Image (cartoon, grey):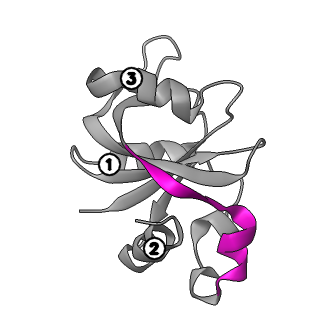
Amino acid sequence: MAHWLIKSEPSKWSWDQQVAAGPKGTHWDGVKNHTAKLNLMAMKQGEQVFFYHSNEGLEVVGIVEVIKEAYAWDEAGPPWVLVDFKAVKTLPKPVSLAQVKAEPKLAKMSLVTSFRLSVQPVTDEEWDIVCKMGGL
């Protein structure tokens, strides 16, 4: 299974709101970038995804799980898609962008190299390192 990272501005959709959505979860919208869309379309049910607060906080704060694979985003029209996620766990210690950049083993992580991309792949090694940094 692959791992991913999704970004959200806390003022638009925060980790607390994602947690409050409960096991039913919620769809992920607002993605209108073709690379990010392709990443959403590659996600499979059950895959784990870092939830990153962008603009405010700049940190990985939790883990969500894909509960529904990509489907048409009717409101936005083709070719845009939605994916549904549910919160799985809060990181005991949020992992800041500064911490990620300071870790040499994460130098090639998309969060560092493609900072503006809102939906990013995460390698297994990157996943393990960030989880350890976050206290998991």
Against 123, is 46 above or below? above
Against 24, is 53 above or below? below
Mark 3 to mark 2: distance in Å? 27 Å
As drawn, the residue found furthest toward the top would be 75
**Given the image, on which type of amino acid does mark 1 rest?**
Met
Closer to the eye: label 2 or 1 = 2
| Residue at image point 36% right, 61% down | 3
Q: Nearer the viewer, residue 113 or 57?
A: 57
- Label drawn at residue 104: none
**Residue 15 visible at all:** yes
Report if residue 100 lies within the magenta region.
Answer: yes
**Residue 28 visible at all:** no
Question: Residues at badges 2 and 1 in contact (C-beta under 8 Å)?
Answer: no
Packing grade of label 3 (10 A; few <14, some 14-19, many >=20) is: many
Circle 3: element type? strand
**Given the image, on which type of amino acid does mark 2 rest?**
Lys
Closer to the eye: label 3 or 2 = 2
- Mark 2, residue position: 132
Against 133, is 70 above or below? above
Q: Position of residue 119 (x, y in %)?
A: 53, 49
Q: Say whether disc 1 or disc 3 marks the residue closer to the N-terminus.
A: 3
Q: Position of residue 12 (x, y in %)?
A: 67, 24
Q: Quadrant of residue 45?
A: top left
Q: Position of residue 55 (x, y in %)?
A: 78, 43
Q: Quadrant of the N terminus?
A: bottom left
- Mark 1, residue position: 43
**Given the image, on which type of amino acid does mark 3 rest?**
Thr
Circle 2: element type? helix
